[in-house]
Amino acid sequence: MNAALKNRLFKGRHIFLGALLLLVWLTQTLPGWGEFYARQLYPGIALCLSSFSDLFPFAIGDLFIALSLMGLIVYPVYARRFKRKTWKNIVFSEVEYVVWIYVWFYAAWGLNYSQDGFYQRTGITPVPYTPESFQTFTHNYVERLNASYTEPPAEVNRPLVCQEAVRGYRRISSNPEVHRPLNNHPRVKVMLFTPLISMVGVTGSMGPFFCEFTVNGDVLPADYPSTYAHEMAHLLGITSEAEANFYAYQVCTRSTEKHIRFSGYYSILPHVLNNAYRLMDKEAYQELLSAIRPEIIRMLRDKQTYWEAKYSPLIGRIQDWMYDLYLKGNKIPGGQKNYSEVIGLLISYEQQR
């Protein structure tokens, strides 16, 4: 390749990258552009990328991220020692690669952060979050949680969970509004670095680069259906953790399978108790705990012990800090507190319904 052609390709690549970067920023900024992306463009993008990732039995997104991080560390040494490149060229190359990753992340999935919020999309009116409305919600919730209790299976029937999740999302796709499943058999992957991920307490993730969703291999049977449905909500374009919890709850609690229905109710119990601890006095909080079946309380405590044995406080704090910054930087002002905001969505939805 002659120098002139190489120079033209170099300039053309950077012009193209600059245009993509500008398009991402405009979509994040201009009213309506994010909604157009989420409604009109994302389903096609997700179908293409997920169809490709489904060809692989492992989480290629996890591998891609690991190799990218390794490459950013190793490349300066390689380029300096064997290619004799200047530090200026090395830094320029690394910055360019990071920008490509940034553009790919937002073009493939991240621009869903710029779509309308839950209340705008669904037309549901937010109900003021008061101790009274919360108490009414918890009373009804505990009754349904207790009634749904069933002993979790020793092993998860993964095809059945997939079938019920697809059926559930098709049932609720228009009210409240969420995309229909991309196909009849969405392929969930096991997290590639499960032991490491368990050290930070993460149970599942959405792989944005190839539109694949993963579940931690250590997830307990009682939590698997709701975790699956939560991560599937992200695959369907839902970015808010509270909304993903909301949709997982709706899908699982409407299932005809007992253990999946219980998983839906059980999935929000920690958020109910966290909110109750803040909003209720000590006596009312103890009454709430005593109203829950002892088998369920025992299951929740056993789960806490199970994850604490795998958790690394140092790595966990670093991950929490980084993920909190990530959420706040993508229009989720509550950061990781967004998970517990599912209760407000459920209260508003149930009162309007």
Image (cartoon, helix red, strand yellow):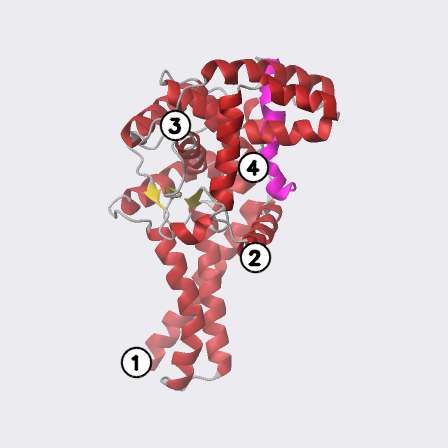
The residue at which mark 4 appears reads as 32
Q: In the image, what residue type sits under mark 1?
A: Asn
x and y percentages locating residue 188 in the rendered image:
33, 39
Q: In the image, what residue type sits under mark 3?
A: Arg
Which-is-in-front pick, marks 3 and 1? 3
Q: In the image, what residue type sits under mark 4?
A: Gly
Q: In the image, what residue type sits under mark 2?
A: Leu
State the CA–CA distance, disc 2 to disc 1: 52 Å
Mark 4, Cα crowd under 10 Å, few <14 / some 14-19 / many 20+, is some
Asked if the residue at tag 2 contacts the one at tag 4, i.e. Cβ–Cβ closer than 8 Å, the answer is: no
x and y percentages locating residue 121 in the rendered image:
55, 27
Q: Which quadrant holds residue 338?
A: top right
User: Magenta region: which residues?
Assistant: 332-352
The residue at which mark 2 appears reads as 314
Q: Residue at x 34, y 33 (%)?
A: 182
Label 4 element class: loop
